């Protein structure tokens, strides 16, 4: 029972790191035009740290009660509050998780996972109360509290890992890259062009792809610009939220994009 109380009153339970207020977001966009999309990674990472801290606190308390079992108190009230809070948090967490995946917001997903830890905590509280009342084994309460804490710890570690992956500018996932490739393949069959040096990354809700498009050397600037605009539109329609950057090159010119000497 005390595991639920410890989690409900911990700093991680009520932590939110607002980084996207309208005024602040506008200033951040001006000061960091290429990096402001990563702000939510800091938010979710900070929340993950607090969740891990709360889980370790619950584990410490469970270990103490394992060594010194204590009788349960306010059983009826505890079960009622746990069930009600679990139902409310579960519904809210499900809605937030669905919306977060829809808009590709790690911050929303972090808040949803935060609430899901509340659901697991409440379930552990109820299971512990019922188990102790049915068997009289006082050690069941700290045992279940420890299991709940391990689950909360797992969620915190997951948030930290996702935040780190975002800050490392990971490439687009294989499914999204396949959609990009299908768009480019369609243009290859219709136009005398080829694409190479395709590099992608993810930053918050934004997806980015950089590539070289090789065109016939006798094309006019207008022809090249019109085709580039068509390719960009096709990519952005295939991948919502994508920002494409296309460098134009003649067919007989190769860019030394991967030249090791450029990395020295």
Image: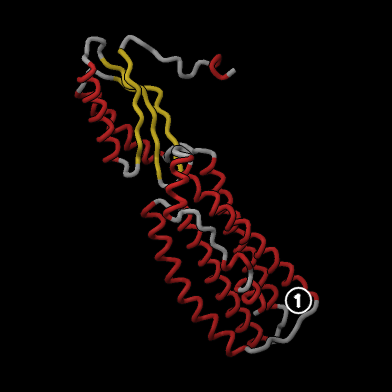
Report the residue marked by disc 1.
Answer: 65
Residue 182 is situated, as x and y percent measured from the top left of the image, at: 29, 33
- 31, 118: nearer the viewer: 31
Q: Is residue 32 above or below residue 163?
A: above
Q: In this view, does 46 lie above or below 57?
A: above
- 83, 43: nearer the viewer: 43
Q: How many marks?
A: 1
Q: Which corner quadrant holds the C terminus?
A: top right
Residue 241 is situated, as x and y percent measured from the top left of the image, at: 34, 43
Q: Identify the residue shown where x is 48% and y is 39%.
A: 32
Where residue 37 sits, quadrant-wise, is top left
- The local crowd at label 1, few if under 14, some if 14 to 19, many if 20 or more residues have their Cα within 10 Å, is some
Q: Which corner quadrant holds the N terminus?
A: bottom right
Q: In this view, does 39 lie above or below 190?
A: below
Q: In this view, does 189 lie above or below 138?
A: above
Q: Identify the residue shown where x is 73% and y is 72%.
A: 61
Q: Identify the residue shown where x is 62% and y is 75%.
A: 4
């Amino acid at each position: 029972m005390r595991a639920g109380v410890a989690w409900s009153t911990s700093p991680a339970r009520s932590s939110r790191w607002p980084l996207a207020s309208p005024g602040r977001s506008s200033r951040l966009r001006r000061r960091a035009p290429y990096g402001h999309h990563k702000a939510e990674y800091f938010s979710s990472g900070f929340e993950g740290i607090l969740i891990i801290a709360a889980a370790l606190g619950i584990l410490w308390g469970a270990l103490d009660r394992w060594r010194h079992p204590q009788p349960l108190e306010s059983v009826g009230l505890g079960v009622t509050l746990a069930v009600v809070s679990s139902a409310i948090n579960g519904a809210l967490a499900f809605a937030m998780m669905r919306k977060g995946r829809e808009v590709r917001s790690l911050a929303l997903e972090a808040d949803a996972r935060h609430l899901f830890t509340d659901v697991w905590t409440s379930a552990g509280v109820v299971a512990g109360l019922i188990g102790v009342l049915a068997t009289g084994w006082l050690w069941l309460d700290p045992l279940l509290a420890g299991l709940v804490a391990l689950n909360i710890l797992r969620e915190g570690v997951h948030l930290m890992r996702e935040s780190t992956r975002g800050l490392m500018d990971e490439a687009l996932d294989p499914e999204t890259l396949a959609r990009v490739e299908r768009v480019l393949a369609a243009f290859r069959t219709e136009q005398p062009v080829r694409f190479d040096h395709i590099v992608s990354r993810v930053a918050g809700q934004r997806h980015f792809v950089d590539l070289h498009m090789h065109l016939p050397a006798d094309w006019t600037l207008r022809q090249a610009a019109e085709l580039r605009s068509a390719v960009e539109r096709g990519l952005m329609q295939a991948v919502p939220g994508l920002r494409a950057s296309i460098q134009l090159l003649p067919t007989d010119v190769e860019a030394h994009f991967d030249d090791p000497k450029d990395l020295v």
